[in-house]
Image (tube, coloured by chain):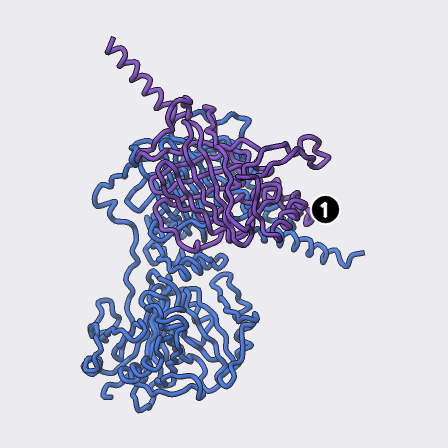
Chain colours: A blue, B purple
Amino acid sequence: MKYKLINPLVLVATALLVTIPTIVSGAESGAQTHHVHLAASNASEAVKWYLRHLPCRAIAEQPDAIDCGGFEIEFVVRATLGGSPGTGVDHIGFSFADLDTKMAELEAVGVRGSGVRLQRFEDGSTLREVPGLFKHGFVFDPWGTRIELVEDPEILGFHHIHLHSEDPDAALKWYSEVIGGKPAKLKGQQDGLLLGRVWLLVSRHPQGRPAPTDERSIDHVGFVVTDLEAASVLMTARGVELQGPTVPNNGRSSAKRAFLSGPDGVKIAVVETGWAGIVTAKLPTEDSSASKEPFTTPRTPWGEPDLQGIWTGNAAHGIPLERTAEAGETAALTPEEAAARRERGTLGSIWGYEREWRDTTLDYAKLAPSRQVAMIIDPADGRLPALTEKGEARAAAARDARAYRRLAAGPEDLSTYVRCITRGLPGLMMPGIYNNGLQIIQSPGYVAVQKEMIHEARIIPTAASPHLGSNLKQWLGNSRGRWEGDTLVVEVTGFNGRASYRGSDENLKLTERYRLVGPHTLEYRFTIDDPTIWTSPWTGMFQFEKDDAQYELVEYACHEGNYGMTNILSGARAKEKLMNGPAG
Amino acid sequence: MRSRLRGDTTGIAILWVIGILSTGLANAEEEFPRAYDDHPDLSGIWQAIGTAHWNIQDHQASAGPAELGALGATPPGRGVVEGDAIPYQPWALDQKQKNFENRLTEDPETKCYLPGVPRATYLPYPFQILQGTSKIMIVYGFAEANRTIHMDKENPEPAPIDSWMGRSHGHWEGDTLVVDVAGFNGQAWFDRAGNFASDTLRVIERYTPMGANAINYEATIEDPNVFTGSWKMTMPLYRRLEADAQVLEFKCVEFSEELLYGHLRKSPTP
């Protein structure tokens, strides 16, 4: 083999891109370097996560990459189509001298915040001994990449890239011929190739052919060669089709890169020495068609504006109600800022099974996050108007309740959301970390607005009809709609006042405006007019994005599975018992 | 004369349209309304009248909790099950009896749980059908239950996820809307008498217009793990003709909290 491979790379495509140059080895194959590209929805969050939890260090001038003992991981910001399991690059591995301690540390982190998801074996343990190999366990990063942790004192730090193949023998043969490296058995047991000090391991995929790595959380594996032109001639001679070599437009150095397809749908990059990653493309932002040509709202067959479809508030999640001080006068966030805010919103709360389940398990593509600075559009400063005297009193009472939060004596001490009764209005329209589906179905004279979270469906009549009598209040009030041009205007009054929004009470008059501002964008405006609480009305706005192709609302049977309520109350009773000392 | 007649006819036609849109009012002789695509338009507010919610089989009057007096009693009623017989497997008949004995605490209805299908149809409350262009939505007041009937999607076998209300796929057979419902979680009951099925339940519903203001509702029940064969219930659904008919919120969660969590209160309910 004439060309010299310096570094194998593993790349992840959607949100996290990892490039890992390994040390140069004297191996006769010449294989010496690799890196991994991982896809993450936010590169800096991903870098932080890896630096915190794994033996890696930051790389100067490369804010989206880390160096894990000579192996480089690059993170690419892009929509991800799912995690690494199930693809031809199932996982990457790290080795620790004391795995019990490391796993205990990760377990203590938990899944809250920028957490760590543990994979448990059938018996519930997180670690187990593989006879003849080593002790091992698995965790997942927040973007769906599976990471094996092993206790192999011979190689500490970055340990291996584990491929899955329909035909492991053929795959090993291909890698050794095209990439280099010597077929060997790790600890005499596990088939693989040793490239420098990094193992490329191959196992038989459990179900036929693995899924392509492209656009998954491990997008591709990269290898570094000293002379890519020379290497490409040799690879082409072996029948390998290369895309490139070229210097990428957005490359940080003049080093060239080429892509090729490896066995089992594994995307492979080969880069030249001096490769310093790429500046990732900007995320797609808003639907630009609205601004280009006037958009015409479609009509139902019976002639009403047609708002039907499945929409989600996912892109709007993270928009604060009020303009923050840091935002200053900014008109809109940059796509990077928006991605970071969305990421904080997701990672800052419980794990967000939306990502686990819809993004990772169901392979949902993620929508670009909204760049909107704040929901409030009136007043123009993006801040809530002053409270009335009564509003002040209510806010103070709410602050006190928070400050002197006591153990819940019964369900009534908990919010109507925790109790699975309702999020109220307009609370139930607000985007959250998961189950943000909104389905609209129309029949002549009626619009049904169904929200996935807590499975509430509102029926809005659009023909003139009187409001309910004043003795018939409801949690969600009483909605009366009308079409103003292509806009559905809904007036809601008759609230029972028990599901407050930011202090609103039973005198709230909510006016909602739904209109399409593009084929895939539903704008939602809500005007809060509650003169007993605020000195003037105020209006918020955010957008729902159409997601008919992949999204389906699931039954959010909240109350039926409200184990949280049982746990909160029984926890409160147990705590009281402790505080009161031994009984009797 | 001719022109006057024409004028009258136009007037009546306009009134009729307004009536349908705003009140659902229609004369008994009138035909069942049709949607834009000439299928029957099931949109409207409907309700089953009867005692099937107590017991889908024939039942005599019987006592309820003594403290509720006659208010808690079960009224007598004719069953809605064809032949009045449900072909339970022996173990399931035992289970049904146990359910009945424990109904005051175990019936999902008393816990304000989603009622499932077909039970949601004949709870004693109105429900609204919205017939859209590719989906039909049914919104029931009780427990905020609602379901989407997919008219536009392939029916995945099995359903991608289990649920209380199941997964509904519909199609038209002439003037009958046929809905295939599966993917149940097996926790819902059929009535307050403890009739039940498991997660292998499949319900085939048939909604057929009968006159202008009624729908004939049929539900064929199959569950190989509970019954020895399929069986069927039938009942009319009546259009609510009041001008101000509306499906109101029946957010019943708070009324079930004492039953579910009373023992966990700071001052536990005895």
Residue B26: image x %, image y %?
40, 23
Q: Is A558 rendered above or below residue A213?
A: above
Task: Out of A300 and B269, give the one closest to the viewer.
Answer: A300
Question: Position of A437 compared to A503: left or right?
Answer: left
Mark 1: few/some/many CA within 10 Å (<14, 14-19, 20+): few
Amino acid found under the numbered disc labelled 1: Ser
- A483 versus A243 height, above or below: above
Residue found at the very far front of the displayed protein: B83
Which chain letter matches label 1? B
Q: Is residue A382 visible?
A: no
Residue linked to disc 1 = B267
Residue B32, horizontal then vertical, whole percent: 38, 28
Can you say which quadrant of the picture contains the C terminus of chain B?
top right
Q: Residue furthest top?
A: B1
Task: Please say whether residue B240 is visible from this viewpoint.
Answer: yes
Please identify the quarter of the rendering in which residue A161 is found.
bottom left
Q: Quadrant of residue A163?
A: bottom left
Q: Position of residue A42 (x, y in %)?
A: 37, 62
- Judged from the image, the secondary structure of the residue bearing numbered disc 1 is loop
Looking at the picture, tell me which residue is in the foreground, A389 or A428: A428
